[in-house]
Image (cartoon, rainbow, N blue to C red):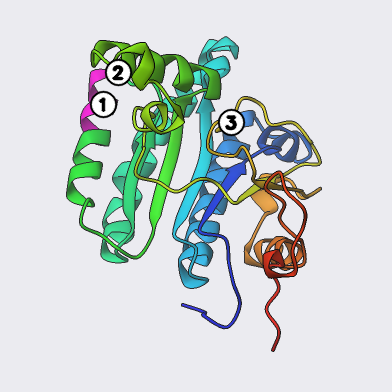
Amino acid sequence: MQASVRVPRHVGIIMDGNGRWARGRNRPHSFGHRAGVRAIKRVMYGCEERGIEVLSVYAFSTENWTRPRAEVRALMRLFHETLEREFDEIHARGIRIVVSGRRAELSPRMRERIADAEVRTSENRNGTLNVCLNYGGRAELVDAVRSLLASGVSAEEVDEKALAAHLYQPQLPDVDLIIRTAGESRMSNFMLWQAYYAELCVTETLWPDFDVADLDQVLSEYRGRVRRFGGRPDVSARLELSS
């Protein structure tokens, strides 16, 4: 892992452009989604090598169910196949897998595969891949409130810390950097609580073309920013380290 420069602890990626990438090659959307999976693998290992602790990828949103049924089926099949095919290598590299999202709407087979991957990689310490599957930021907050109420807390006990403890993956740090590909500048209901002070970097690169060189370019931009958390900027907040 590289230690000479400071890197974000938690990077979230809104992976956009699979469809456009496929259309540009006169291929179906499924062709773009498969290329997008290969990009996840490149970037995941790039994050590991650069010392980034957590990578969260927006794989399938709660709104994506409105897509054509055939595309949704193909996506779910691709998720299952990818987890089955790539699991051993990810596990061997010491990367932990967690999944954020509403699981009740997934197939029993998918839920079983997710639970198995989480249990078997739970002791891995070389980084965490957080797959946001059937995920929505608003849905997560609704589910957190429901869980909080079900725990029997009183109104006086409800605060930010209490609510955060009932998110899908409360053990993960807040997001430092959000990357969105394909030139779009929307958050699209992604990690609304965790990314409340995240830096946002937008790249024109379509997700299937995104590689470690693009990652390094974004990280360079991130290091040059001064992060503000509601107060006045301070020289100590500058991310780029002096040599």
Q: For the point 57% across and 60% down, which residue is it?
A: 8
Start and end of the magenta stretch? 107-113
- For residue 52: magenta? no
Counting from the top left corner in percent of width and height, residue 243 is at 69, 89
Q: For the point 42% across and 43% down, which residue is it?
A: 130
User: Depth check: 99 or 241 in front?
Assistant: 241
Mark nearer the viewer, 3 or 2: 3
User: Depth check: 19 or 179 in front?
Assistant: 179
Q: What is the C-alpha distance between the residues marked 3 and 2?
A: 23 Å
Q: Earlier in the sequence, mark 3 or mark 1?
A: 1
Disc 2 designates what residue? 107
Instruction: Find numbered disc 2 in the image and state the secondary structure of the residue it sits on.
Output: loop
**Residue 113, located in which quarter of the rendered image?**
top left
Q: For the point 81% across and 41% down, which residue is it?
A: 183
Magenta stretch, main secondary structure, is: helix
Q: Earlier in the sequence, mark 3 or mark 2?
A: 2
Mark nearer the viewer, 3 or 1: 3
**Would residue 224 appear left or right of 125 to someone viewing this image?**
right
Counting from the top left corner in percent of width and height, residue 234 is at 74, 63
Disc 3 designates what residue? 190
Q: Are marks 1 and 2 in contact (CB under 8 Å)?
A: yes
The amino acid at mark 2 is: Ser
Asked if 95 appears above or below 168 in the picture, the reply is below
Instruction: Find numbered disc 1 in the image and state the secondary structure of the residue it sits on.
Output: helix
Counting from the top left corner in percent of width and height, residue 41 is at 48, 55
Q: What numbered label is drawn on residue 111?
A: 1
